[in-house]
Structures are given as structure tokens and as C-alpha cells.
Amino acid sequence: MALKLINGRFAAVATLLVAILVTGCVTTTDSRFTREADRQKAVDNYVQLATAYIGQGNTGRARYHLDRALELEPDSPQALAALGLIYNSDGDAQLAEKSFRHAIASDAGYTRARVYYGAFLYSQGRLDESRKQFYTASKDTDYKDRGSVFYNLGMTQERLGLQEEAIVSFRRASELTRGDARSLLSLSRVMVESGDVAGAARHYDRLMQIMQKNERLQHSPESLLTGIRIARHFGNGNQESSLVLQLKNNYPESVEYQQYKALISNDK
């Protein structure tokens, strides 16, 4: 697996409400609450099935199950958020945004909808709006994939030119994910660009240690250029030559290789 920008993948969490009415020595079940619990369970099951189909790329089957869920609960934030993903994959940006916004309006605390909406806004180039959604989502300490939220927030901040804020977010992402490769790489790269090469080197060294232990992780053009810039700063000619050779041989047409050639040209 090459180290590249990867969209986060998300999973749904369901809530089941059950009520029991006890009268004297006789226990009975209130049919209204039973029906409500059964309806909610059916909605949850439909959304879980739809999410699985979305993961497989089968949006047709996913849409069928979401339609069933929305027939039972038209304002289900889980179903509406998932429906937004389908609209977006079909190129219906207006309908996608309408679904994401409807999901958030139905439950402002449903963080997954904000994450989906933030990613949608990012893809549309609406970076400041995207940053606000990811920032709000990052405040949910119970969200299971919070590390990815901070990573996405960092990417958005970086695109907006907010390097110091991006460093904070990438560092938090690295802490929450216990130093996953993409967070360490982004943190190292932005720190190099901000001038803190010594700090970048510490995180890059951690990245190299992780790569040595995991054969599936391979250098990307981004990781190679970051390492080259660190090596040049500290005058480590051997490491620089090794990384340059890999960049030239493996990614000769990459933007990063062109940036490297511009880098050495400027030095001359």
C-alpha cells in the first residue's frame, strides 16, 4: 500500500429503544413502545445493509434499503447521510448536499453526517465550509474514528494556507491513531514546509520505522520528496541519494520528481 491521501471509511452506530410497562404483579408490554422499538430496529438494519452495499460499490441495492428505511423514518439522520453518499457518487451534488444538510438538521449530534458533509464540501473546493464541519466533528470525543476527522481537518487547513493549525491537527491525528503512516507523513511534510525541519525529522524517523516493520507500506512520491528535503537540510548525502534514486526510478513522471529537479536547480 503506497502512502497516499486516502479518504476515510466510515461505519454506522445504531440505537435500540425498548420500554416495558409493569402493573402490579402482572408484566405487560406497551404495544406502542414495542412498535416503536421494532420500527427503529428495522431502520437500523436497513441502514446497516445499505452501508455494506455502498462499501461494495452496489449503490442500487444500497438505495433500495435506504428507501425502505426512509419510508419508516423520513428524518433518519443515518439513512439521509448514507443517501447523500449515493447521490454524490452518482454526480448529483445538489441532492447530495440536501441529504447531508437534512441529516444534520435532524440530529446535529450525528457526527458521521458532518464528516460526510465535510468531505463533500472539500471535494467541491468549498474549503472554509469543509473546515467548519470537520472542526465541529472533531469535538465529539465519543466518535470512534476521531483520528481521521483530525486528519481531514488538517488537510483542509493546509489547503487554506493555515500551516500552523494543520500541524496541530496532524499531530492530534497521529496521537489518536498511535502514529499511523499517513498522519506521520503529512505532519512531517507540513513541518518541513513551515521550516521546522528538526521536528519533521523526528516524525519522519517514526514513519521509516513503521515502514520497515510493515512490508505492505511502500514509499510514495510524497514520502520520498519529504525525506529528500530532510536529508538535504542535514547534509545526509547517502540518504538523499538513496531516496532520489527511488523517486527517479519509480516515479519519473510525478509532480514530486519535478519539484525535486526544481529544488536542486534553485540551489545551483
Image (cartoon, rainbow, N blue to C red):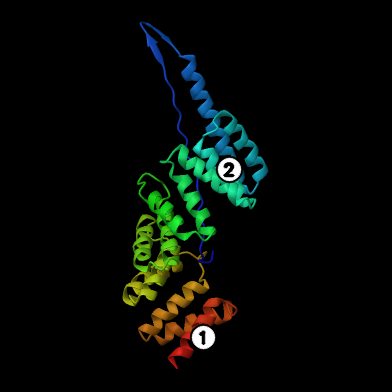
Q: Residue 83 carries which label?
A: 2
Residue 51, picture quadrant: top right
Residue 22, picture quadrant: top left
Which of disc 2 and disc 1 is earlier in sequence? 2
Looking at this view, name the residue that lies furthest to the top.
Answer: 25
Looking at this view, name the residue that lies furthest to the right.
Answer: 60
Can you give x and y, in whole percent of width and height, for residue 268 in the image? Answer: 45, 94
Asked if residue 134 is positioned above or below residue 182 in the image, the reply reads above
Secondary element at image label 2: helix
Nearer to the camera, 63 or 235 = 63
Q: Is residue 137 left or right of residue 215?
A: left
Can you give x and y, in whole percent of width and height, for residue 225 in the image? Answer: 47, 77
Secondary element at image label 1: helix
Which quarter of the image is occupied by the N terminus?
bottom right
Viewer can see residue 55 = no
Q: Is residue 77 left or right of residue 164?
A: right
Can you give x and y, in whole percent of width and height, for residue 246 in the image? Answer: 53, 79
Amino acid type, mark 1? Lys
- The CA distance from mark 1 to mark 2 is 45 Å
Q: Identify the residue shown where x is 37% and y is 83%.
A: 233
- Provide the residue designation for mark 1: 261
Q: Identify the residue shown where x is 46% and y is 50%.
A: 115
Amino acid type, mark 2? Leu
Q: In this view, does 72 lie to the left or right of 202?
A: right
